[in-house]
Image (cartoon, helix red, strand yellow):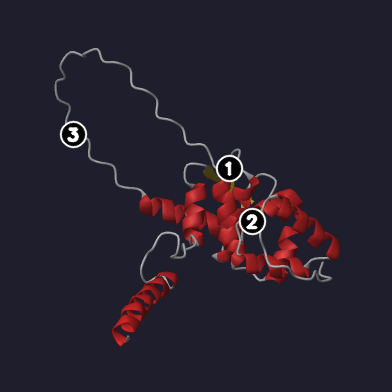
Amino acid sequence: MKKKLILIIVPLVLIGTVLGLAFMGIINIPGITPVKAATWQATLKKIYTGKGTIKGDLIVFKDLPKADQDAFVAAANKGGLKATVEKDGIKSAQLVAWLKKETTASEKPKPVAAKPTPTPPPVATAPKKAAPTTDTKPEVGIQTIADLWNGIDVVKLVEIIKTYKDPELATILLKMEPEHVSELLAQLSADRAAALSRELQKQGAIIPVVKSGDGT
């Protein structure tokens, strides 16, 4: 009887230990180990590279989705670079200096040109296919800003979301931690919290039920 009990308990202990290590991130098990959020530096480089240009103390983007722009500004402010959205672009002298430093450091030195050598007559070859262009994916920006909002106090977050429409805001909230979303809803007015809750339900959210507060 004791041997049977040991044969049952030991595997359970081993399974529990492995799952615990996975939840703590010590070992990686897909679907169990938490995914680490992107750092603010990585977010800035990812959104700026190939999409942004520097003009004075402005960072200018062409056809950048609002979610990506918000993620870019939030990441800059998280790093203490004090970025603000202006009419012509995103303004921050500190951010411009940081981007110049990072992009310059990542550039590889150009190879020294070799002496020209005689070339044989050209041989006809099939034209090369143009490399496919990479379109900006809004869901990347949505996930990035959701990760950043998870680390912002809900009182400050209430001020940030004032200009967002409910369907657009719900799309971001769906990517956030449910507990943080619940705390945010509790800080909103009853009407706004109810409207957002309906929109989240419409988009398939499952979040804990909380009583709406009288926040602004």
Query: Residue drawn 56% across and 54% down?
Result: 143
Give the amino acid type for the residue marked by disc 3 in the picture: Ala
In the picture, the quarter occupied by the C terminus is: bottom right
Q: Nearer the viewer, residue 28 or 77?
A: 28
Q: Element type at marker 3?
A: loop
The residue carrying pointer 2 sits among few (fewer than 14), some (14 to 19) or many (20 or more) residues within 10 Å by Cα, namely many
Front: mark 2 or 3: 2
Q: CA distance from mark 2 to mark 3?
A: 56 Å
- Residue 100 is left or right of residue 164, and the answer is left
Q: Element type at marker 1?
A: strand
Q: Quadrant of residue 28?
A: bottom left
Marking on residue 114: 3
- Residue underneath mark 2: 174
Query: Residue drawn 61% across and 61% down?
Result: 176
Tell me if residue 151 can be seen.
yes
In the picture, the quarter occupied by the N terminus is: bottom left
Give the amino acid type for the residue marked by disc 1 in the picture: Phe
Front: mark 1 or 2: 2
- N-term-proximal mark, 3 vs 1: 1
